[in-house]
Image (cartoon, rainbow, N blue to C red):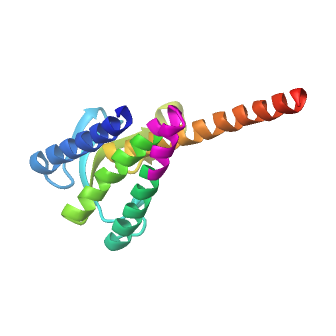
Amino acid sequence: MIFWLIALIVLLLDQWTKWLVVTRMEIREVIPVWGDFFSLTSHRNRGAAWGILQDQRVFFIVVTIIVVIGIVYYMLRTIREGRKLMPLALSLLLGGALGNFVDRVRLGEVVDFFDFKFDFRGIGIPFVYDFPIFNVADSGICVGIALVILDTLLETRREKRRTSHDSVNG
């Protein structure tokens, strides 16, 4: 039950923050939060991460439906197996996928607003990196993917230990 609640919280937090941006900011408006490093920037994206595959709304809707079905199936399976980290990871992925899905269905585009700029000139490197603007759903997806990778590595390690233990005792 807790994993479904986590997915719902990610979805609701994502939609609430996007609602705040849409109703209180003009598109391209920038509100500095922490100097030039972090701003809230009202942005719309008709594509995927980094703006790739612009204006492929139907494609993203279909792919998201397939992905959500896969996430739910795998989440149910890993919950039944008694695992903890993988269902947590999948709940973050589910909430994030649904958050951006709602935007694409309702608005035809995704609302983004977290804007980070990494300025290395202060340490003598003539380089400024403007990270792509993102949202709460994207954060859930990224953290979820990181946890899937971590769980996979840990599970592989546990499996190797089981295999070596079984061969020694076999």
Residue 56 rendering spot, x and y as whole percentages:
35, 72
- Check the image and report above or below for 85 versus 102: above
Residue 102 position (above or below residue 47): above
Horizontal side of 113 relative to 70 (left or right) equals left
Q: Residue at 18% of width from left, 42% of height from top?
A: 16
Please provide percent x and percent y for residue 73. Answer: 46, 52
Which of the pair 34/15 is nearer the observer? Answer: 15
The number of numbered badges drawn on the structure is: 0
Which of the image's four quarters has the C terminus? top right
Q: Position of residue 89 (x, y in %)?
A: 47, 39
Which residue is at a point 77% across and 30% down the rendered structure image? Answer: 161
| Span highlighted in magenta in the image | 73-88
Q: Is residue 162 magenta?
A: no
Is residue 120 visible from the viewing direction of this image?
no
**Quick one: quadrant of the N terminus?**
top left
Residue 80 is one of the magenta-drawn residues: yes
Residue nearer the viewer, 101 or 139:
101
Q: Residue at x 21, y 42 (%)?
A: 17
Residue 44 placement (x, y as % from top left): 26, 58
**Residue 147 falls left or right of residue 100:** right
